Image (tube, grey):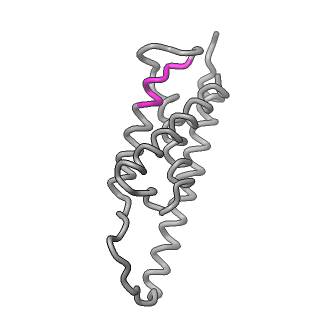
Amino acid sequence: MFILDLIFALAFGWFLVWIVSIAFGTKGPWGSFIWFFVVVSLFAWAGGISITPFGPTWGGIGWLPIISMGILASLILTAASPRRPRRRKILPEETSAEVESKVLVDSIFWIMIICLLIFGFGHYAWFPRVV
């Protein structure tokens, strides 16, 4: 079940991020399609397996919780994402406060990724499925 859950979350995460990127013209809060895909897929996987499966199943996977968590995560991250600027303007050099805030945001990002991975893998260890 672990592999099928993860593959479905990755496939749906890629599709969802691709659609959101086209529809809203954004690549996520980090300005990278790959990181947007990773975060949405991990949220879909970790959140989808923690919810009691509902709706139809496919291959033993309740796919509606994974889809709903992926949609929720992508919409929240899209709302926090910067839009493409219409025209370029010359940016001033970064101050030390801006550099410190970027380091803080990057640290929070990596902590979130690690927590999602621990939560996802831990779910299978703490709540094994009995077939």
The quarter of the image holding the N terminus is top right
Q: Position of residue 22 (x, y in %)?
A: 41, 49
Residue drawn at x 38%, y 79% is 88
Q: Would you say 87 lies left or right of 45 here? A: left
Q: Quadrant of residue 93?
A: bottom left
Q: Is the stretch drawn in magenta largely helix, strand or loop? A: helix
Q: Magenta span covers which residues?
A: 61-67
Residue drawn at x 45%, y 57% is 27
Residue drawn at x 41%, y 89% is 92
**Magenta stretch: residue 43 in it?**
no
In the rendered view, tell whether residue 76 sits above or below residue 83. above
**Magenta stretch: residue 66 in it?**
yes
Q: Position of residue 114 (x, y in %)?
A: 60, 51
Q: Would you say 64 lies left or right of 106 here? A: left
* Extreme-top residue of the structure: 131
In the rendered view, tell whether residue 107 sits above or below residue 89. above
Residue drawn at x 53%, y 48% is 37
Q: Position of residue 53 (x, y in %)?
A: 46, 19
The mark tally for this picture is 0
Q: Quadrant of residue 129?
A: top right
Q: Position of residue 90 (x, y in %)?
A: 39, 87
Q: Would you say 75 lies left or right of 2 here? A: left
- Asked whether 130 or 18 is in front, the reply is 18
